[in-house]
Amino acid sequence: MSFLNINSFTQKLLNAQLLRRKMFVSPGTVNSLRLAVLLKEMGFIIGFSLFYISDRKFIKIFLKYKNGFPALKSARVISKPSKRIYLRFESIAKFNPNGGILILHTSKGLLTDYQCKNLGIGGEPILFIF
């Protein structure tokens, strides 16, 4: 799991929304593509598309706004290479009492906290969206 890609992707997303951009471009790594799919499913972005420039893959993210405000208000990277955190599925609810969305890296890929509870699996919390 490359945390640099997740950190970079999250910062580009938040910065683009602060500047009221309609879209932004990020390197098309596996993790950024998985995160884009999850954000689309949760309704935080309109969509995304892949394109290539001289054999390098990039992903174009189309941002979503509701009444002029960004759909994604804030996001924070939780587990970092310097401090790794792992949660069993019983402790996911304790970790997320505020009602935000927690994205975890599991053996099944990137999943939300709700999906992890339904599957009965834990993982490494990557991103907290609130």
Image (tube, rainbow, N blue to C red):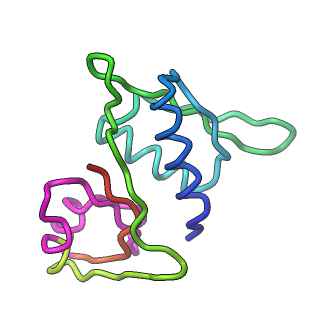
Farthest top residue in view: 67
Residue 100 at what x, y percent from top left? 21, 53
In this picture, is 13 found above or below 94? above
Residue 89 at what x, y percent from top left? 20, 77
Extent of the magenta region: 93-120
Residue 102 colored in magenta in the image? yes
Q: Give me the residue at 76% from left, 36% from top.
A: 52
Residue 2 at what x, y percent from top left? 59, 67
Q: Give me the residue at 39% from left, 57% from top.
A: 76
Q: Is residue 28 left or right of residue 31?
A: right
Q: Is residue 61 left or right of residue 63?
A: right
Farthest front residue in view: 18
Q: Give me the residue at 59% from left, 56% from top.
A: 30
Residue 13 at what x, y percent from top left? 50, 40
Farthest right residue in view: 54
In this picture, is 77 found above or below 12? below
